[in-house]
Image (tube, rainbow, N blue to C red):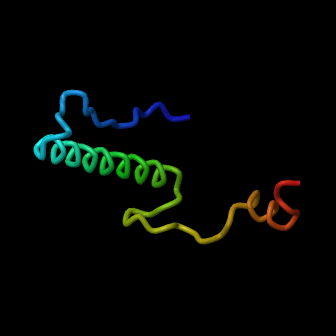
Amino acid sequence: MESTSCPRASWVELDLERAEGEAEWLRRVARVADERRALARARLARLGLIDDAGRPISDALPADLIDAGEHGAGR
């Protein structure tokens, strides 16, 4: 299991009833989403599942998923 901290957006000091507060909140949420996507993409690349452009390395299913489908998953 990786120990990478998941980015979060703080809203405590924002006044979300004001347009400026809401705009700042949306900016923070977008930034956190970008950071989380980057972390996920880096993890998938480290696992060898995607290439540098973010494309899947293979479209083949892992053996455990193939077996589950053939033998009736959830039995």
Side of 66 where 25 appears, left or right: left
Viewer-proximal residue among 4 and 7: 7
Side of 53 where 57 appears, left or right: right
x then y, percent, for residue 71: 88, 63
Q: Residue furthest bottom?
A: 59
x then y, percent, for residue 22: 18, 45
- Residue at 46% across, 48% down: 43
The image shows residue 2, relative to residue 63, as above or below, that is above
The image shows residue 30, relative to residue 70, as above or below, that is above
x then y, percent, for residue 35: 31, 46
Viewer-proximal residue among 54 and 69: 69
- Residue at 22% across, 43% down: 25
The quadrant of the image that shows the N terminus is top right
Viewer-proximal residue among 41 and 9: 9
Q: Residue furthest left?
A: 20
Side of 72 where 4 appears, left or right: left
Q: How many marks?
A: 0
Q: Residue furthest top?
A: 13
- Residue at 25% across, 47% down: 31
The image shows residue 39, relative to residue 11, as above or below, that is below
- Residue at 41% across, 64% down: 54
The quadrant of the image that shows the C terminus is bottom right
